[in-house]
Image (cartoon, rainbow, N blue to C red):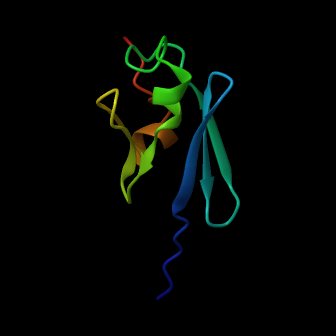
């Protein structure tokens, strides 16, 4: 049995978007607009992103997004 994994290794803020990069070089980009904790925050706080095996976290903003949610198109937007 073979298991394919492609872990996210880097996350950064860039021009209103969060850009995630995986081990294989795959990039996932999503907007911060609509997320009440991200939109309107300082570039410094937005750039301070921690990557875990399950998602990303902004310590100064108390915001977490799971990779599963991101891949499903949920970026913390208001409903």
Q: Nearer the viewer, residue 79 or 40?
A: 40
Measured along the vertical axis of the image, is residue 61 above or below residue 47?
above
Q: Position of residue 40 (x, y in %)?
A: 48, 11
Residue furthest bottom as drawn: 1
Residue drawn at the location 51% of the way across and 70% of the way down? 5
State which quarter of the image contains the C terminus.
top left
Q: Is residue 72 left or right of residue 24?
A: left
Q: Position of residue 15 (x, y in %)?
A: 69, 24
Q: Position of residue 72 (x, y in %)?
A: 47, 38
Q: Quadrant of residue 69?
A: top left
Residue drawn at the location 38% of the way across and 18% of the way down? 37
Q: Nearer the viewer, residue 77 or 4?
A: 77
Q: Is residue 62 left or right of residue 55?
A: left
Q: How many marks?
A: 0
Residue drawn at the location 51% of the way across and 28% of the way down? 44
Measured along the vertical axis of the image, is residue 77 above or below residue 53?
above
Q: Quadrant of residue 58?
A: top left
């Amino acid at each position: 049995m073979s298991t394919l994994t492609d872990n996210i290794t880097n996350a950064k803020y860039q021009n209103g978007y969060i850009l995630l990069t995986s081990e294989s070089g795959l990039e996932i980009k999503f907007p911060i607009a609509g997320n009440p904790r991200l939109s309107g925050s300082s570039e410094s706080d937005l750039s301070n992103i921690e990557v875990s095996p399950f998602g990303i976290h902004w310590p100064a903003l108390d915001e977490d997004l799971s990779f599963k949610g991101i891949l499903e198109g949920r970026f913390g937007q208001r409903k």
